[in-house]
């Protein structure tokens, strides 16, 4: 009866499989919230386009040295702050925050 028996293999999955699973889940969660996609991808791309227009030659010939780090910093900050706010809003909408409040987990303070 070995064909019908179930014998799990103890131990963790390989790192590559765990990384693929986590990445796939994060991408699905990101794509469900269109606001986060806009803030993460569209806004920085529009700003890059705007700051590379020919009217902004006052920054100098190497304006990429100024523009790219600025846009990267803006992207990280906007994704962090708004991602947290949008994520909290969606968690509240779907009742996750209420469920977390009723768990047996201790408070952080």
Image: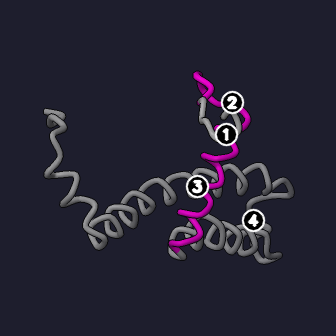
Measure the alpha-carbon separation of dots 4 and 1.
45 Å
Say which element carries label 1: helix
- The residue identified by callout 1 is 19
Measure the alpha-carbon separation of dots 2 and 1.
6 Å
Report if residue 28 lies within the magenta region: yes
Residue that sits furthest to the right in the current view: 61
The part of the chain drawn in magenta is: 8-33
Q: Residues within 10 Å of mark 2 (few under 14, many from 20)?
A: few
- The residue identified by callout 2 is 15
Between discs 1 and 3, the one toward the N terminus: 1
Measure the alpha-carbon separation of dots 3 and 4.
44 Å
Between discs 3 and 4, the one toward the N terminus: 3
Using the image, determine if residue 96 lies above or below residue 54: above
* Residue 26 locus on image (x, y percent): 57, 55
Say which element carries label 4: helix
Q: Is residue 89 left or right of residue 108?
A: right
Say which element carries label 2: helix
């Amino acid at each position: 009866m070995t064909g019908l028996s179930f014998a799990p293999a103890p131990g963790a999955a390989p790192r590559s499989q765990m990384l693929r699973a986590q990445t796939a889940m994060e991408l699905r969660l990101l794509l469900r919230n269109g606001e986060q996609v806009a803030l993460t991808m569209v806004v920085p791309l529009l700003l890059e386009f705007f700051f590379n227009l020919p009217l902004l030659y006052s920054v100098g010939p190497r304006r990429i040295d100024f523009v790219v780090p600025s846009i990267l910093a803006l992207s990280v900050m906007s994704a962090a702050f708004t991602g947290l706010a949008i994520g909290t809003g969606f968690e509240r909408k779907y009742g996750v925050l209420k469920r977390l409040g009723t768990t047996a987990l201790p408070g952080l303070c």
